[in-house]
């Protein structure tokens, strides 16, 4: 069953609290992000090891496994985007259709233990990459294909919301 793609522009989480998961980007700096990512990564192995990890709570919501695979890929994608921003002046990021990726990569059919391991590895790489950003690099810019502009600092704040929100999604759906 296909899930309706999320077309919301979530960049507002940079400046506001998410009313669902509680993440408040207005209180987060890039220096907080590595700790947020590392802490979040510790919650995923348990979620991905539980019974029913492949089960969707309803026809419009990903399973815990699909969310985990997505979060793994978000860590990878944001690490790539950070590297691009640090290497080039004002790059435009290649478009990433996360919903198409979920289908093409068969998120729901992947091995949960492998996803858990890869998610942890990708999270640690991302946390290190953001931790290594120097103060003189914080205002470097990059553009999403939809025109949303980020600095390195705002990309970090935006990025941290995604894994936090999706772990909240998984735990909410299980409750």
Image: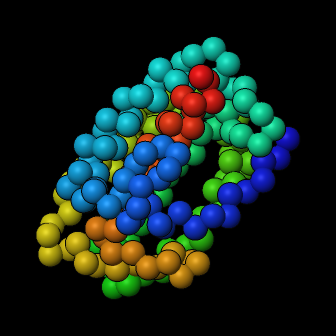
Picture coordinates of residue 93, whole percent (x, y): 50, 74
The residue under the point 28% across, 56% down is 28
Residue 2 visible, this orientation:
yes
Q: Disc count in the image?
A: 0
Q: Is residue 69 visible?
A: no
Taking the view exactly as shown, the residue that stands out farthest to the right is: 1
Please provide percent x and percent y for residue 44. 46, 29
Residue 149 vs 69, above or below: the answer is: below
Task: Give the residue furthest to the top.
Answer: 51
Query: Taking 151 as reference, is 2 left or right?
Result: right
Where is residue 68, by image quadrant?
top right
Query: Residue 78 appears in which quarter of the rendering?
Result: bottom left
Instruction: Assign the N terminus to one quadrant of the image.
Output: top right
Which quarter of the rendered picture does the C terminus lie within?
Answer: top right
Front-lying residue, 155 or 14:
14
Using residue 107 as the reference point, say whether residue 20 is left or right of it: left
Front residue of this view, candidates 20 and 74: 20
Q: Position of residue 153 (x, y in %)?
A: 28, 68
* Colour setup of the view: rainbow
Q: Residue at x 47, y 66 (%)?
A: 12
The location of residue 33, given as percent across then percent down, is 28, 51
Q: Is residue 8 above or below residue 171?
A: below
Q: Residue placed at 38% from the left, 84% from the top?
A: 90
Tell me the residue at 52%/24% (across/down).
47
**171 relative position to 155: left or right:** right
Residue reaching furthest to the bottom: 89
Q: Is residue 173 above or below residue 147?
A: above
Toward the left, the furthest residue is 135
């Amino acid at each position: 069953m296909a899930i309706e793609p999320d077309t919301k522009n979530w960049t507002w989480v940079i400046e506001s609290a998410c009313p669902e998961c509680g993440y408040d980007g207005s209180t987060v700096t890039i220096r907080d992000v590595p700790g947020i990512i590392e802490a979040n990564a510790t919650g995923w192995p348990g979620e991905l090891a539980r019974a029913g990890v492949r089960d969707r709570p309803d026809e419009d919501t990903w399973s815990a496994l699909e969310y985990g695979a997505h979060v793994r890929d978000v860590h990878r994608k944001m690490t790539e985007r950070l590297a691009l921003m640090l290497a080039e002046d004002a790059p435009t990021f290649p478009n990433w259709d996360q919903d198409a990726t979920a289908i093409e990569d068969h998120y729901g059919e992947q091995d949960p233990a492998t996803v858990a391991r890869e998610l942890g590895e990708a999270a640690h790489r991302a946390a290190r990459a953001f931790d290594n950003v120097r103060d003189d690099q914080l205002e470097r810019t990059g553009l999403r294909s939809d025109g949303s502009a980020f600095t390195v600092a705002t990309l970090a704040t935006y990025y941290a919301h995604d894994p936090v929100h999706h772990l909240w999604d998984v735990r909410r759906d299980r409750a």
